Amino acid sequence: MDDDVVLSAPLFANMDSEQTRALQASMTRLELTRGDVLFHEGEPGDRLYVIASGKIKLGRRSSDGRENLLAVLGPGEMFGELSLFDPGPRTATASVVADARLLELGHQDLVDWLQSSPTVAKHLLEALARRLRRTNEALADLVFSDVPGRVAKALLDLSTRFGEQVDDGLRVAHDLTQEELAQLVGASRETVNKALADFAARGWVRREGRAVVLLDIDRLERRAR
């Protein structure tokens, strides 16, 4: 397991090496494959997860069966922390997008760490605040941005975590199906595909299956505003 990636998670911020080793030793290691469901919306939750490798999607399903993706998370990110501060049903379903390795921490273990290292609580709260800010931005985008603008913003957001520089641009291996990408944007698959086709025709992106190469980031940034 890549310790450098794991240690970039807010849970481990500002810990000394001895504390870090002890905390990692108290966590359970999990290995999951694409399509596995870690937990379902509505289930009781008392676990926090740190992603060492792979990708996890968090989604919700409406009463009529429609799905919406709240986030796609990758190495060094964590999720499930809300249930540790406010125990109750899970607010989303966590599924594996790309084969993943995780570290799992239970509620009581975290409480013990918070008592012995109060700075951990500060960094977890900062992570929650960032998550809330992103949620507020997503809600504003649904109201004020058109679909192409939301597609451009989603691609740029994914590139900050999954982007890899290649000769002609930034390759983003998002591992999402067309339907999942549409759910992330909050639009129909047909409308999202039309926006991507338009971006490709303009020379802003190149599509490569479950990846996209960003060829003109400046143009995408202007379209995302």
Image (tube, grey):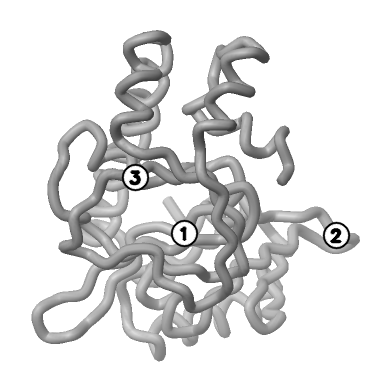
Is the residue 34 above or below the residue 80 in the image?
below
Q: Residue 181's mark?
A: none
Q: Which amino acid does the dot numbered 2 rest on?
A: Val
Q: Which amino acid does the dot numbered 1 rest on?
A: Val
What x and y, as percent, mark residue 203? 70, 73
Left or right: 151, with 88 as reference point: right
Q: Mark 3 points at which residue?
A: 47
- Sequence order check: which comes first, mark 3 or mark 1? 3
What x and y, as percent, mark residue 181? 46, 74
What x and y, as percent, mark residue 98? 60, 69
Of the pair 162 and 96, the residue shown nearer to us: 96
Q: What element carries label 1?
A: strand
Q: Name the residue under label 2.
A: 166
Is the residue 9 above or below the residue 98 in the image?
above
Left or right: 116, with 27 as reference point: left
Which residue is at the far left?
Answer: 63
Which residue is at the far right?
Answer: 167
Q: Distance between the residues labelled 2 and 3?
A: 37 Å
Residue contact at pointers 3 and 1, CB within 8 angstroms: no
Is the residue 63 above or below the residue 159 in the image?
below
Q: Residue 72's mark?
A: 1
Is the residue 27 above or below the residue 217 in the image?
above
Q: Which amino acid does the dot numbered 3 rest on?
A: Arg
- At horizontal 43% and vertical 77% (from top left) the residue drawn is 180
- At horizontal 72% and vertical 33% (from top left) the residue drawn is 4
